[in-house]
Image (spheres, rainbow, N blue to C red):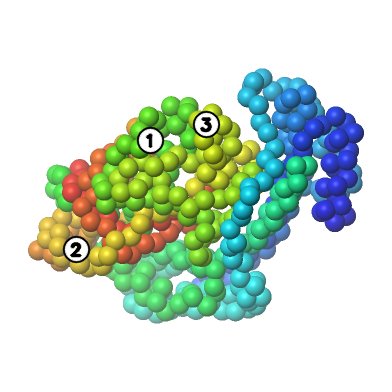
Amino acid sequence: MQAKQFIKNLFGAGKKAGIEDMEVFIQGNSILELMVFQGEIDKFSKAEEKGLSFRGIYEGKMGYSYTEKIDEASIEFLVNDVISNTKIIDSDEQETIFKGSDHYNEVNTFNLELEQTPIDKKIEFIKLIEKEALSLDDRVESINYCIYGDQSRENMIVNTKGLNLESKINSAYMYISVVVKDDNDIKTAFRYKLYTDFNKFDYKAIAKDVVEEALSLLGAESIKSDNYPVILRNNVAAVILDGFSGIFSADNVQKSLSLLKGKLNQKIASERITIVDDPFMEDGTETKSFDSEGFATKFKKVINKGVLATYLHNSKTAKKDGVQSTGNAFKSSYKAPITIAPTNMYIEKGNKELDEMVKEMQNGLLIIDVQGVNSGLNPISGDFSLAATGYEIKEGKINRSVSNITIAGNLFELLNDVEDIGNDLVFLMPSNGYIGSPSLKIKSLSVAGE
């Protein structure tokens, strides 16, 4: 049965059963993942998933249901499940179905050429990058992981108030982790790249970059415990921003799970810091014209020159605060509840090259990797303590590699201590949002070492 006919029949059955406003959210995913080991394909996974969530208002309360089977046999189950669900809801909060925004920006999020790229070409690419990395230096001991993947996602929202929206997005990524060894000294490094255009992958450049970094860490030692001027390389700054991204959620603010409560329109960071949530960004994995409730997305500066300008809202939190939704309602899958997440969120880049920032620092540390984010970062207090790797900077030059250290501080102090911002904006692997940052020069951070 075609989706449109199914939805028509479902709404008809729901209306007959006494359900008032109704909405269908359909999501389909197509995922390819390839892993190569010693020149052979070690994993080949191709999967497709499609499902539907259904919600509706029955006797003044919103009920929810979902199914993986979009066929006539599922209609009775969905209707009955929504009605049953409303009878166990204790909350007095009234939820509504949204009729739609007045205007939706056009976005280009689907690359047909990527979808049509032959699998043989993708296999050749992932084999070439492994081969190249292994050939660059005799000290390259092995390749832990060498992975290529791509994904396409389709969303459809249709409701009885006239809303009818569809979107389609795709992207490709690769990940490589390299192990190098010199006598008994073993070090690793990794690289991750994501593009919407397959032709942007440069296997030679990626292999050279990751191998050179792994080799540069050989001989790394700890450093004396102290407070140091620090440059957080772009990937590290993005990891920290990602770990704290939940503080901007209006839901967490309203539940007193964010220290940003009561800080709207107040200065919370250096005036150098502007954090943007950009749903229209070219090549963003969360580029979209509408959110998971059908609200039009909006470009917004969450922090504008150090001042907290907005929280991120869905319709429920917006209603509580008496404001409009910011278009940040999010469903991680058709089975999931509606939450709040950023779209493409990043710290606006500056105009300094990383080498220039190192030269100007004179003495300090460049941090290139951190570990333990899940356990070492407290999104409520803003405190963090993370195992780190990097380089000692002396007289404006990289002096030696540094390991077995821990950097510690507080997010809000860190944001206020930003002295300079690089021009090297990068993004992390997407999870609940696509998070990025350029490199940040920090006045001082506590470093525990020797």
Amino acid, disc 2? Val
Across and down, in percent, residue 10 comes to 85, 42
Q: Which residue is mark 1?
A: 264
Across and down, in percent, residue 197 comes to 54, 73
Tell me which residue sits at (35%, 57%) in the image.
348
Q: Judge by depth and name the residue closer to the eye, 193 or 266.
A: 266
Q: Which residue is mark 2?
A: 358
Amino acid, disc 1? Leu
- Determine whether label 1 and label 3 are within 8 Å by CB: no
Residue 240 as seen in the image, left or right of residue 93: left
Tell me which residue sits at (46%, 66%) in the image.
193
Q: CA distance from mark 3 to mark 2?
A: 46 Å
Q: Which mark is residue 416?
A: none
**Is label 1 in a helix, a strand or a loop?**
loop
| Name of the residue lying farthest toward the front | 102
Q: Residues within 10 Å of mark 1 (few under 14, many from 20)?
A: some
Q: Quadrant of residue 117?
A: bottom right
Question: Visible in this render: residue 379?
Answer: yes
Q: Earlier in the sequence, mark 1 or mark 3?
A: 1
Across and down, in percent, residue 128 comes to 50, 79
Q: Which residue is mark 3?
A: 322
Q: CA distance from mark 1 to mark 2?
A: 34 Å
Q: Quadrant of residue 45?
A: bottom right
Q: Is residue 95 above or below residue 54?
A: above
